[in-house]
Structure formats: C-alpha cells, structure tokens
Image (cartoon, grey):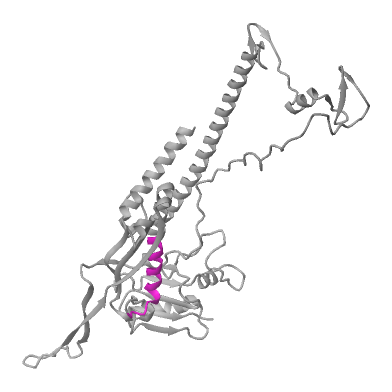
Amino acid sequence: MLKKKLEELEKVRTTLRKVFDQAGDDQDFAKVTELSGTVEEKLAEVRKLNGVMAKLGKEIDDYRVADQAREALEKAEKAEEERVLKAGRPSLPGKTIEGKDFKLDQTPFGHRIMKAAGLEYDPEREMFKQIAGGVRQGEGCKVVKLAGFNLKTLFQRSAGWDPEVLRTGRLVDYAVRPIQVLDILPLERTTSDGIKYMDETTRDESNIIEKAEGNQYGEAEFALTERAVTIEKIPAYVPVTDEQLADVAQAESYLNNRLPEAVRRRLDYQALHGTGVTPLMLGVINKTGIQETAAADGDATADHIARAIKDVSVTGRAIASAIIMHPTDYLNERLRKTKDGAYVWGNPSMPGITSMWGLPIAQADSLAAGKAIVGDFRQYCAFVEREGMVVKMGWVNDDFIKGRNAIVAYLRGAFVWYRAAAFNYITLPA
C-alpha cells in the first residue's frame, strides 16, 4: 500500500511540475495545456491537486510510522529470543524449542527487584509486604525504607530521553491578500525601458456628408499624439544563512516561492492604486480621464453596474469585459432577497455568483468598499512586461565571509491604460 501511495504522489507531483513549467516564471496559466478550462478553473484544479498531494503525504507518513513500529517490534522480539536462548531457557511465550513449551515470568521488572530486596507485592491490598523465608511477616505493613537499599535518581524523561516528536511536512500559510486583479489584465512585452504609443486625440468626421456632383467634398480631421509610459521596477530581498539553505532542503524552494509571490502581490495592488509618479506604476483609478459615476436615487447595485456598462459602451466606445468589487459589496449582493424572502441570486445551496450582466466578477479587497470598477480590460489596457520575475542570490558587503546570502526577486514593467473612458470607477448605492 505504501508503494501505491508513493506512486500516486509522484503522479500528482509530475502533473503539477508540468503545469508550473508551462505557466512559466510569470505564472501565466493561460499558457497551461496540461489542464483544461479557463484560468480560474485551472487554478482551482491546482488547488485541488495541492490538497491531494498534502493528503497523500500524510497517509505516506502514517504508513512509514507503522512500518517503523513493526520493525521495532520484530527487533525487540528477536533480541528477547536471543537473550532467552543464551540463558538456556527452553522457549519463549507462544514458541517451542526442542519440543518443550515454556512461559516467561510476566512479573514486572520492578516487582522482581523489590522481591529480591525482601518485599513481595500484594495485589489485593496494592502494597508491598516484607517476607522472610518465603513467609509473609506482618499484615498490611507498608515498608518504605530498607536497610542497605537506597533510591537513586528517578529515571524519567527529565533525566533521560524526552520522547521524539516528528514534525509533519505541513506548512500553514500566513493569511495574506491573494492575487486578485492581475489575471484579468492582458500581458504584453517590450525590450525597451519605456513604452510609447500613438493616441488618436482628434477624429472629426462631422463634415463627411453626401454631395451633389461638382460640389466640394467634406473634410475629415485626424490627429495623433504620442504617449509615453516609463518602465518601473518592483524589487524585494530576504537574507538567509548558508546553514539554513544547506541543512533544510525545503528552505530554498520556500523562499524562491514566497519572495516572487510578495512582489506579484505588490504589483496586483499597483494595478488599482499606483499613482504613476516614478517609481510607482499607474493604476486604473488614477488614470486621467477615467469615468466616475455615482448611483442614482433608488438604484440597486445591479442597476448601477448595468448603467456603468452602458457608459463604457456609449461614452468610452468600448465593450466592458469585467467587474471589480470589494468582497463586502459582493457578499451584500449575494445575500440580496426579494420581498418574499427569496435570494435574488439563487438558493444558498447553489454556487455563489461569478458574473453579473454576463461579466465576470473579480473580488479585490484592496479596492475600497462601496466602490467598483467596470471596464474593457481586454482591449484598452495591459501590463507591459520588460523583465518577468527574476530571482537571484548573491552577497552584500562582507556577507560572503559571514556565511550569509541575499535572495533577490524583482520584475520590471508598467501598466498602460490606452483609453481612459473605457473604464468606469463607480460609487455603489449605500
């Protein structure tokens, strides 16, 4: 059974290795072909496989402990058998040597010592009684001190061995905000330290009308403006000793996972809140020209979001592709009921709402409660990557001769919001 569990564990590990190799350093799960479905479905499957791997690891540990107990028991039985045979006794309990059956003395070892010192245990009275020549002397006499018999240090855990406690392989993650926004943004790449693009700032077609033969044509007006965005850098590092890396196999992989995740979490925050003032990237909320609308009197949340979608379409001339909401606002909407007490978005036994008006909902607790963003995240924005996630290890000052290392992780890139009016930063109804 242990072999079977090990094979199952290796199968799950092989699948996860393929998934992360295909996702690459930027963890782009859209590239993953090992799993089917949307990015969200692939991430859910990764979480499921991770749970299966943890469960199999626990079961394998249990089987190994059982094997160790069995081996210890067999070793003890063999040692006892050799001791008895060496003493010339005919057999062990349940075993026969040369056709003779023999039952070992089951008297506790401590009782045998006390008997040799002149005491015999009375199980009925639960006490030791003094004996002489095989005859008990005194009825109910508790002997607490014997001439020539001195008690030494009690052999117990504090003076002997503390029982060994094995540490499980489980690591309980610190509670941090997950990556919530990056997955809905397109990824583009550049080889430069900046991004320039042309913005069509003038497009006048009002004079284009039908004309009779011989009349002057209507004139159209077009003008472009060059826009520039600076590539910024999000770095982080953690110091670690040579001994920690050498003595604990898990330490390096743990840090190589945690540090890039921390950098991506900062990037996820910047996608919404970055001011665009170097070295900060520009977040959608601070993009000049973004639409901002408040709810009309009597509007429900769903009503206001529907109107925001319309504004993105009519004013922004774009097609809204996603909604970003705070988890509290999402919950309030999920719990909305009719006057009859029925849940608007379905019975509690049903899965939570994943979309509204056909648009997927991204929950982001870095967004202020009472706010939401509706926009065209497919066509009119992108994270432009100059350098994907880079992880390095080196030394600072005299770290090398002190056995200390610095593990560094960073990425370089910028958020580009090509059309501000394609995004609507709305205030939800109170």
Q: Is residue 144 left or right of residue 335?
A: right
Measured from the top left, where is residue 361 in percent x and y? 43, 68
Q: Is residue 328 left or right of residue 252?
A: right
Q: Residue at horizontal 61%, vertical 40%?
A: 163
Q: Is residue 359 visible?
A: no
Q: Residue at horizontal 47%, vertical 83%?
A: 295
In the displayed image of the protein, which residue is found farthest to the bottom?
Answer: 215
Front residue (pair 387, 123): 123
Measured from the top left, where is residue 274 in percent x and y? 37, 77
Measured from the top left, where is residue 249 in percent x and y? 42, 47
Q: Is residue 234 left or right of residue 212?
A: right
Q: Residue at horizontal 58%, vertical 20%?
A: 78
Front residue (pair 366, 322): 366
The residue segment tinted magenta is 259-277
Relative to 110, is 357 above or below? below
Q: Is residue 135 left or right of residue 383?
A: right
Q: Quadrant of residue 321?
A: bottom left
Measured from the top left, where is residue 323 in percent x and y? 41, 72
Q: Quadrant of residue 107?
A: top right
In this figure, what is the number of numbered marks? Answer: 0
Residue 262 lies in the magenta-colored region: yes
